Image (tube, grey):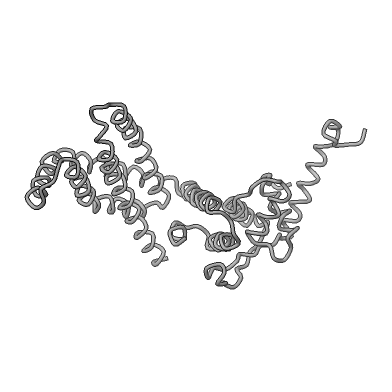
Amino acid sequence: MSREALGNFELMALLAILRVGEDAYGVPIARELEESSGKDVLLGSVYAALDRLEGKGLVSSRVGDPTPERGGRAKKYVKVTAKGVREIRDTQRTLVRLWRGLPGLRGEPV
Amino acid sequence: MRLLQRFGVDDALIGDLVEQRDAGRSRAWLWWQLSVALLAVVARDIAKQPLRFAIALLLAWVLRYVTIGAWSAYEPSIDMTIGRLFLDVVPMSRPPLLVAVACVNAILLAPVWFTIGFVVARVSRGAILVFLALAVALLAPGVVRQLAHTISSDMVRWLLPVQLATFAAAMGGFVVSAATGATIALQRRHAIA
């Protein structure tokens, strides 16, 4: 696991990007997070998380074409990098290890 | 939306908000998202350049303090002069005269607030929003106290609309002038960048 651990929201954002696929940009990522968590998600928080993830090299972004329905503004598409995928797997392994031996949290069949 | 852009909110995020507005999201939802986006940018700016932020905020406070100090020293005579000039042109009763004098005060002070907004925004984008919020927050309790006193007193309750109008002129003039100065400063910074 890297020195700078993934935050909870960052991990959720990475997984949401993977679930959305090729067309992952702010709105569908936020929708995916809202549907999964059942809570309102702020687009500003999603962008802040994407900025941090990009800074850590876990996602890469490309700017699409500006469209009139967005007031002439382009979409910023993101995808998880190979390093990002490794980080997700590492985090998953760590969490699973921590879960084990905690039957109260259904971490392991007794 | 243009204001958000000038304050450094990601263009793609603004596009997402436009898309969601047209998709039927409520006005309240949009305002909430806009406010948080703006706050996030301010927080990021502060985190990136804390020293610049501190200097800008200190500068804003010193300029405001000096301005208010100088203005307070001359305000009674300025108000008298403005009042006399008004009465020479249009005879009016005391309440509208008080409101008119407050409006002229706001206009006279506007260039100063504009300059403070311009200078501070040039130093730190986040500082101007924090400065405006702090200044209004510090003034608010005094305003509320005065209004509460006016409402509770039978003798001066008639003054309430006058007080509301004078406060609106003073605080509105301050916020609008400083924000306009900041917006123009950020537009220039954007253009230079």
Question: Quarter of the image holding residue A28?
Answer: bottom right
Where residue B171 appears, x then y in whole percent? 31, 44
Q: State whether residue A26 is above or below residue B59.
A: below
Residue at 38% x, 49% y is B128
Residue at 28% x, 40% y is B161
Where residue B189 appears, x then y in whole percent? 38, 62
* Residue A3 visible within the image: no
* Residue B50 visible within the image: yes
Where residue B23 appears, x then y in whole percent? 60, 62
Left or right: A46, with B175 as reference point: right
Residue lying furthest left? B88
Residue lying furthest right? A110
Residue at 34% x, 42% y is B58
For the C terminus of chain A, give its image quadrant: top right
Q: State whether residue B166 is above or below residue A43.
A: above
Q: Nearer the viewer, residue B147 or B72?
A: B147
Q: How many marks?
A: 0
Q: Nearer the viewer, residue A44 or A70?
A: A70
Left or right: B94, with A47 as reference point: left
Where residue A57 appears, x then y in whole percent? 65, 57
